[in-house]
Image (cartoon, helix red, strand yellow):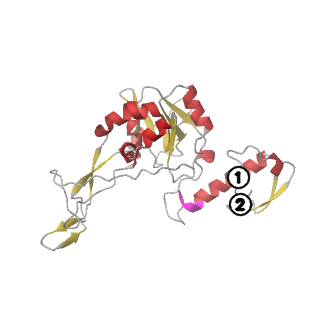
Amino acid sequence: LDVPFSPRAPPPAMTDDGKLILEPPASLAVAPDGNGGIYPAMVKHSVLSDMKAKGVRYIHVFGVDNALVKPADPTFVGYCIRQKADCGNKALWKTSPDEKVGVLASRGKRPCIVEYSDMSKEMSELRSEQDGRLVFGAGNICNHFYTLDFLEQVVVPNLGNMYHIARKKIPYYCDEQKKTVKPTENNGIKLESFIFDVFPLSESMTVLDVRREDEFAPVKNPPGSDVDSPDTARRLFSNVAKKWMREAGATLLGDLESDQCEVGPMTSYGGEGLEKLAKGKEVACPFSV
């Protein structure tokens, strides 16, 4: 098993006029640099050069907060390779205009992600006259494909151009009070970047539209929340397991609403090969195979 780690180094926070901020009296205040920090981290910790030395040509990147993510998804990776893409993105259609996910769009004939907070109400609610779907509805789920050449030859040389300015409440050391103070209003700026900031650099990006029920079970909120919680993710994950067993020929019995059903990743990657366990058999829910 070869699992390299590439911790990110958060940049220092600054005042609006560009001065560095002290948090304790002898240390700089730093702030997370956003998930786009993956790119400089991979350079700093020699991850890209290690991949190249091992003959790696394609990279699948995804968020850890999606319980239904398919690492190294052969359908997605294979599709991107067949399309000769240097960059790829999985997308699923938004369920409603106010769903809080960024959307894939084109700006200046270049692919990009537009955050939901940057869209007007009119844009977010605009629907196609042909099929009634949201025009800006291709939701981004942080599931990306890159060629190693694209990261090395295009992304790395442009790392210095990827930062955005975000105004934040940044704790600072107060000389008068002789202690670190937590401000109630924004008092400084931090530099951040997003993993999708590289999309406009692509010359041949492709997108794979996927089904939400098969691909997306996010965990963003605490237990007990109505959406995007461990509870909802567990239910979605369990539903996929039940679907696979039914498709393989099983008759499900017991608690059919159970959220404790699982097909382990060593048993099946995407529902294949379950016939010996399922075909013509009765399987009681909850189950784990």
- Mark yes or no: residue 134 visible: no
The answer to whether 185 is drawn above or below residue 248 in the figure is: below
Image position of 20 (left or right of 64): left
Q: Given the current orientation, which residue lies at the most extreme front position?
A: 53
Circle count: 2
> Where does residue 82 sit, x and y in percent of width and height?
58, 26
Instruction: Classify mark 1: residues with Cα within 10 Å, few (<14), some (14-19) or many (20+).
Output: many
215 or 87, nearer to the observer: 87
Q: Main secondary structure of the magenta part?
A: loop
Look at mark 2 in the image and give the residue it sits on. Answer: 257
Image position of 106 (left or right of 247): left
| Mark seen at residue 241 | 1
Q: Given the image, on which type of amino acid does mark 1 rest?
A: Ala
115 or 166, nearer to the observer: 166
The residue sitting at 46% across, 34% down in the picture is 148
- Mark yes or no: residue 72 visible: yes
Q: Quadrant of residue 182?
A: bottom left
Q: Given the image, on which type of amino acid does mark 2 rest?
A: Glu
The answer to whether 31 is drawn above or below residue 96 in the figure is: below
The residue sitting at 38% across, 42% down in the picture is 43
SS for dot 1? helix
The residue sitting at 29% across, 44% down in the picture is 164
Q: Which region of the structure is painted magenta? A: 226-231
